[in-house]
Image (cartoon, grey):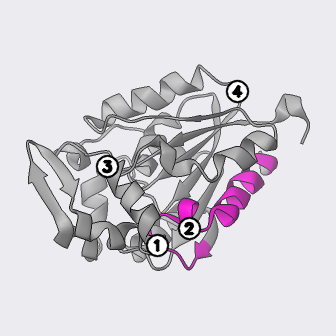
Amino acid sequence: MSMQNTPSIVFAHGLWADGSCFSKVIPALIADGHDVVSTQNSLDTLEGDVAAVRRALGRVSSPVILVGHSYGGTVITAAGTDDRVVGLVYICALAPDDDETSQSLQDKFPKTDVFDYIEVAEGRIWLRPEGIGCFAGDLSADEQRLVWATQGVPDVDLFNQRIPGAAWKSKPTAYVVGSQDRTVNPELERFCAKRMGATTYELDSSHVPMLSQPEAVTEAIRKLAMSV
């Protein structure tokens, strides 16, 4: 892969995470010669988070691969319709169609354990400390505490918001499934991967394979970047 056609990589995080959740995959991608930005999404509105990703597209060289984790998949599904985007990587992620919201897509599958450990306060949905095992159960106790401490806390209405445009319908995709995920149902993940015709990687991981199996996630991103 020569430098002039090396795509840039822009990451979008999900709920109860922040841009640092990709910290174990970013250094290897930079070493490969990619421009990399990990957006910090407010989790206030879907429109605002999509706008944050589109702003990041202007800070790196085109073409761009978008990588979305969890709700970040909903974000890149909308932001990815931008002409500067040439591919999408989904990590244990939601990937709604034009007529779906994050919530309506989730509602098609049985609820996961994490919903027993959330608390709504001041209009936001918080992950309680004892729920971190459902989110990042294959990390060390110290790492789990760090993930919990840096959680991004979503607006209570975030999953009901919708933006038209499903980039996965027209652009190359890869999907990393976490078979032990207790936050997003693994069956939902397999459904999304199959529906979009993604190159699929199934890992024996929790909801955060980019932290528990970073080499495998990096390789999935790398392969899509080389293919486009």
Query: Residue 133 at what x, y percent from top left?
Result: 35, 73
Give the left or right position of residue 90, taking residue 103 as reference. Answer: right
- Report which residue position mark 1 lands on: 206
The secondary structure that dominates the magenta segment is helix
Number of marks drawn? 4
Question: Which image quadrant for residue 57?
Answer: top right
Report crowding for label 4: few under 14, some 14 to 19, many 20 or more residues within 10 A (C-alpha): some
Residue at the extreme front of the image, as rendered: 142
Amino acid of disc 3? Asp
Q: Residue at x 48, y 31 (%)?
A: 53
- Which of the two discs, 2 and 4, labels the residue nearer the N terminus? 4
User: Sequence-wise, which precedes: disc 1 or disc 4?
Assistant: 4
Say what amino acid the circle numbered 4 marks.
Answer: Ser
Q: Which tag, 3 or 1, sits closer to the chain's start?
A: 3
How many residues crowd mark 1 within 10 Å: few (<14), some (14–19), many (20+)?
A: many
Q: Crowding near pointer 2: few (<14 within 10 Å), some, many (20+)? A: many
3 and 4 marks in contact (CB < 8 Å) = no
Q: Which residues are magenta?
A: 202-226
Residue placed under numbered mark 3 in the picture: 99
Number of the front mark, 2 or 1: 2
- Residue indicated by mark 4: 62
Helix, strand or loop at mark 2: helix
Compared to 138, does 65 lie above or below?
A: above
Which quadrant: the C terminus? Answer: top right
Which residue is disc 2 drawn over? 212
